[in-house]
Amino acid sequence: MPAIAKKSGLNGWKLNTEAGRQWWALVDKTGNYTLSEDAFKYNKATNPNSGDRVYRAQMIENMVIPELWEIPYPDDMSDIFARKVFQSAYRGVHFYKHLQSAGGHWPGDYGGPMFLLPGLVIASHITQPPLPETHLALMCRYMLNHQNSDGGWGLHLEGASTMFGTVLQYAALRLLGTPANDIRMVSARSWIHNNGGATTVPSWGKIFLRLLGAFDWEGNISLLPVMWLMPRSLPFHPGRYWCHARMVYLPMAYCYGHRVTGPVTPLVEELRNELYTQPYNTINWAEARNACATADLYYPQSAMLKGMNRMLNVYEKIKLKGLRKKALDFCLEYIDAEDEHTNYIDIGPVNQVMNSVCVYHAYGKDSVQFKKHVERWNDYLWVAEDGMKMQGYNGSQLWDTVFATQAIIEGGFEKHFPDTVERAFNFIDNSQVREEVRDHHNFFRHDSVGGWPFSTAAHGWPITDCSAEGLKTTLLLKNSSVAATCKMHDEALRLKQSADLLLSMQNQNGGWASYELTRAPKWLELLNPSEIFGNIMIDYPYTECTSACIQGLAEFSKHYPDYRRNEIDTAIDKGLKFILSQQGDDGSWYGSWAVCFTYGTWFATEALTTGNRQLTTEIQSALNKAAEFLLSKQNADGGWGESFESCIQKRYIPHTTSQVVNTSWAVLSLMAIREFAVGSQQSAINTAIQKGVELIIQRQQANGDWEQESISGVFNHNCMISYTSYRNVFPVWALGRYVKQNKTTS
Ligand code: LAN
């Protein structure tokens, strides 16, 4: 354990922000900034999710909690319960406003996956610039904090132990100086050995170990760089992959083709000895190639892929050198373009560190490219009471800001917090993509202008639903009491560009995917080599993305009724049909990006009840079924709670306790549906809403915050991810909707 471990407590860490960019620094211990270390206790046994306490403590230090009598509920609100709801929502917004950055966005912990930080530690070992000394202890603390009681680590922080998680944390902890005889390393090693040793680590783990020099090339599947030179019209051309798969397999192919390996230091030699169940030089690497630990196996490699791999590994021995060089030159050109397009942030945490290794290999450690990469490492790091982690993106800035804004204005709270909303609007305004990136079609990018990214303008990859939420929020603000101060410069042009972009991103089947059109058939999933993620090969249409696009376009048409009206109407109708087609027999919708059916159902029902459409009998019956589904899942305490296992197993699996976030989605959804419900269903819905809202209020803390409960985000069915903002935003949104619907009831 580094010597600095004891010295760098959490009380001196402070988040800096600039135009959405976020980075943590240890401020001068002698400065004014001190908080009690006691505030930052983390206990995995109580809750493996940290509560983002370090950032929150920094922001709420001087917060004064409003007394109930100071909260100004509207004069026409005669119903006692509605007043209570109003006060709770008001406190929720009052608390949350303190977390807003000067630039208008809401920073928050976006951790969860456990395979990201080790990737960075390995990259820094290969490229040798030391990670700042102040960081090392906190990184170790994070990894050790998340060790499971059986000695291993999961794919994500709530997951049961996997070979992927365990081998990577083990290697990273050792690289950061944890001795092999540390009791926690000893138990990690026995987990690894008892479960088959590191030869059974899934393919991405093999790639990381190989870069490090602790795995043999023979044991890796070929990532065939020459695929990039094939005709673009081929259905399996990598330019057709989902952009995340495309951008991760690109640097992987570069490293594979160049056999990039870090320095085999004595420590790496030790890892070779420690990670395997037999001596390193006796391992049968060809056999290891297809081995995957049972604990990890979620999406087995298909027979077709295995067959292809066998052939490709033969090709590797006879490959055409000239062609390989040409392919690798293209890979580097594309890596450079991605770096430039995203200001070296890159689309995500995996290709960020992989590209760092590639440019280090191509241009050297003193190159501008490499230095720019290293600077951006900080954008991915986050400090919370569990230590320093690497996040799933460079943040969720835009996403959190559009949701927070909608949550606040739903109940009219912008009247009470105009500055907060104005600052949020400025952030949204500044985050829209205004220019196309260089040579975007050559590098397989869809158009970007008019879109919004998930994080920051500097990252710049537009996403369908982020764009739609950006558009919708901007327009909703025009109808709010802060319209005068939330004016977008060049609004008509920019919002039309946004609508154009959304229209261009709709698939033939009416659904919207995440970043781009679906570019290849579903069978391409048979080439998914990851073993641990589902649905990564192509960009599939999603209920959530489709719902957001429908809502964005519908709002747009209200404000610009003459602009491409027929096309928008058709797009919305096709989108609604797609959503109807996704409803399960039990009336629910599967959610792909959060846990799980309550999330999907909330999105779907928002779209189906979106104004300015005719309520067809089909929609009516879908809404009735959705209500039945939600009613059937309400717990006796009034809440809803869903386990992340729902995402993995694709069937509803209840959590052991109600969750505030699930409850908020369910209640929001029921409130969207209730005006379309009839007879006895309507009164059942009303009771359910009342009980759900009561639970949300009960769970609120005196300062207006809600406790961090279980993890709520997910990607690719199997990996969970934290959305810290959700525990504040969705309760406020649900309470706000209740206020809106009950303003004048008595
Ligand atoms: C995200 C984060 C945002 C999310 C929403 C906008 C919420 C969603 O509605 C659409 C999909 C999207 C953009 C999304 C896709 C997958 C991401 C990028 C992530 C969950 C963040 C991290 C994850 C990424 C794939 C992690 C790296 C792992 C790989 C398998 C490449």
Image: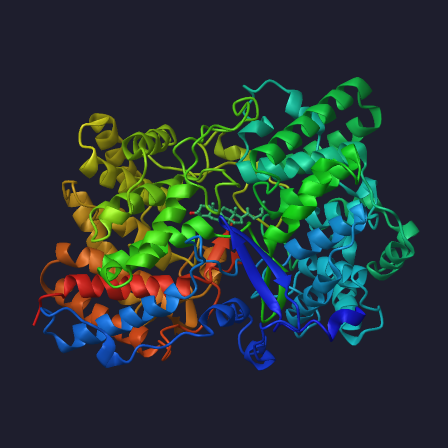
**Residue 733: percent from the left, percent from the top?**
29, 61
Q: Is residue 673 left or right of residue 78?
A: right
Colour setting: rainbow
Spot the residue most to the front. Answer: 31
Residue 530 visible to an observer of this rendering:
no
Q: Is residue 678 above or below residue 531?
A: below
Query: In which quarter of the view is residue 257 placed?
Result: top right
- The answer to whether one can see residue 689 in this image is yes
Residue at 81% x, 65% y is 177
Q: Quadrant of the N terminus?
A: bottom right
Residue 584 is left or right of residue 271, and the answer is: left
Task: Please name whichever residue, 111 or 306, is drawn nearer the observer in this view of the structure.
Answer: 111
Q: Is residue 288 shown above or below 437? A: below
Q: Nearer the viewer, residue 520 or 59?
A: 59
**Residue 509 place in picture, x, y as percent:** 34, 32
Residue 279 sits in quarter:
bottom right
State the residue at coordinates (50%, 56%).
648
Camera-side residue: 656 or 421? 421
